[in-house]
Each structure stands twice: as structure tokens, then as C-alpha cells.
Image: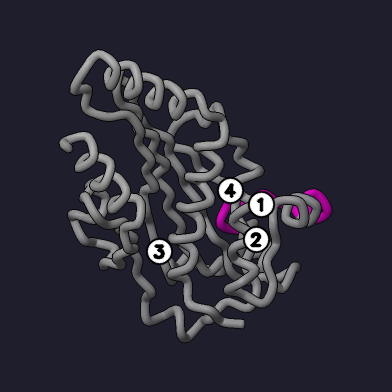
């Protein structure tokens, strides 16, 4: 019965609703049973400068993402942004334009020149961090994802959002058999190469869905 209760509780967490909170909510990044939290803010200036074109800026990584490719993250973000903005410059189009113009988006002056010469005045900055742990009977994988929209002319932040996607597996051993089962589930999740890309897509979708649609 206790094992059944644990399984039912895990199922409820998996079906948890997404809760939207203010970006400065101090509890937004804390793990809370039964809900997924997305913190976001759309600043008043956004509506004075609504984006018609957005370039995906090179990603900033808080730690080394061995299992994820930064360019793949940028491309995935571009796909999600295409459902919110008329025109999106993903990593391939961005890099071609940067080579042609001999500019670098790391520098404010170059960002202003890029905006003027490509008629693309806004950029989305991305940051992501992989976290997690693996014990004998439990594994948890996490991807923290953050994004903000800036006006390339002056780096004003117009919108920002963040979310941590989590996935765990294993259980509380109640017998030698359940210990083996829990350890097997935990090991399978820890070594599953599809988990991180799936978590990334979850984090991208939930975060970028808070960007107002300006198409």
C-alpha cells in the first residue's frame, strides 16, 4: 500500500500544472511538490518597443553542458520564438550575418550596428545550467533555463523569464526486491541520453511561452 501511495504521488507531480509567478518571487526557483513554476516579467517599455524581429544571441552557460550542444539550444529557442515574433534570426542566419558584417554581438556598439544593418532590433539572451544527482535509489535531473529580451540599441531589458525543469526516478525501498527495482529505475534515468534534451524542450517551451505574441 505504501508503495502504491508513492507511485500515485509521483503521478500527481508528473501531471502538475504550470504556475506563473512574478520574476522577483523569492520562491520561484525552489522545488515545490505538485506544481511547476515559471517566473516572468513583461516590462511596460515592451509595449512601446514591441519586437518585430528577434535575433537569438550566443548562449551563456553557467556550467559545461557535456550532453547538450549550445548551438542546438539556440536553434530550439529560435523554433519556439517563431511562434511569438514575425521574424527570428536563429544561429545559422545570425552567424552568416555576423561574418558578412564583421561584427560581434559581445560588444554594445556592434549590437547597435547589427540592429541597424539587419533591420532586427531585438535580441534574446539565453542561459542554462544542468544540475542533478544520482544516489543508489534515486536520480534527479534538472535544467535551469533563463531568457530575456533586450533592445539592441541600448540593451534595455523588455521581458525576462526563468524556469527549472526537473525529472526524478527511483523510490523508497520497502524490501530487497523493491530496493533492486528502485536502484534500476534510478540508474536507467541517470544514463538515459534522451532525458536532458526532453527536459530542455520542456524548459524552453514553458519559459518562452510567457513572451507576449507580437505577430
Residue 5 percent location from the top left of the image: 20, 42
Q: Which range is magenta? A: 98-109
Q: Which mark is residue 160?
A: 3
Residue holding disc 1:
75
Q: Residues within 10 Å of mark 1 (few under 14, many from 20)?
A: some
Residue holding disc 2:
79
Q: Are marks 2 and 3 in contact (CB under 8 Å)?
A: no
Closest to the camera, between mark 1 and mark 4, is 1
Q: Residues within 10 Å of mark 2 (few under 14, many from 20)?
A: some
Image-based side of 16 in relation to 153, left or right: left
Looking at the rendered structure, the secondary structure element under dot 1 is helix
Q: Is residue 95 above or below residue 167?
A: below
Viewer-proximal residue, 124 or 33? 33
Lower position in the chain sequence, tag 1 or tag 3: 1
The image's colour scheme reads one colour
Q: Is residue 212 above or below residue 172?
A: below
Q: Residues within 10 Å of mark 4 (few under 14, many from 20)?
A: few
Amino acid at each position: 500500500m505504501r508503495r502504491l501511495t508513492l507511485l500515485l504521488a509521483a503521478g500527481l507531480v508528473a501531471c502538475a500544472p504550470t504556475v506563473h509567478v512574478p520574476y522577483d518571487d523569492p520562491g520561484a526557483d525552489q522545488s515545490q511538490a505538485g506544481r511547476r513554476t515559471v517566473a516572468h516579467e513583461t516590462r511596460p517599455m515592451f509595449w512601446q518597443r514591441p519586437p518585430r524581429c528577434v535575433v537569438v544571441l550566443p548562449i551563456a552557460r553557467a556550467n559545461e553542458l557535456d550532453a547538450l550542444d549550445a548551438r542546438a539550444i539556440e536553434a530550439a529557442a529560435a523554433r519556439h520564438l517563431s511562434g511569438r515574433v514575425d521574424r527570428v534570426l536563429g544561429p545559422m542566419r545570425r552567424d552568416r550575418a555576423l561574418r558578412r558584417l564583421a561584427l560581434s554581438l559581445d560588444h554594445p556598439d556592434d549590437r547597435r550596428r547589427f540592429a541597424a544593418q539587419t533591420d532586427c532590433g531585438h535580441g534574446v539572451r539565453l542561459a542554462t545550467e544542468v544540475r542533478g544527482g544520482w544516489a543508489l535509489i534515486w536520480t534527479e535531473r534538472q535544467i535551469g533555463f533563463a531568457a530575456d529580451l533586450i533592445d539592441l540599441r541600448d540593451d534595455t531589458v523588455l521581458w525576462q523569464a526563468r524556469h527549472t525543469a526537473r525529472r526524478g526516478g527511483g523510490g523508497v525501498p520497502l524490501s530487497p526486491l523493491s530496493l533492486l527495482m528502485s536502484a534500476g529505475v534510478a540508474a536507467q534515468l541517470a544514463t538515459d541520453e534522451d532525458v536532458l534534451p526532453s527536459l530542455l524542450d520542456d524548459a524552453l517551451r514553458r519559459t518562452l511561452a510567457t513572451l507576449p505574441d507580437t505577430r
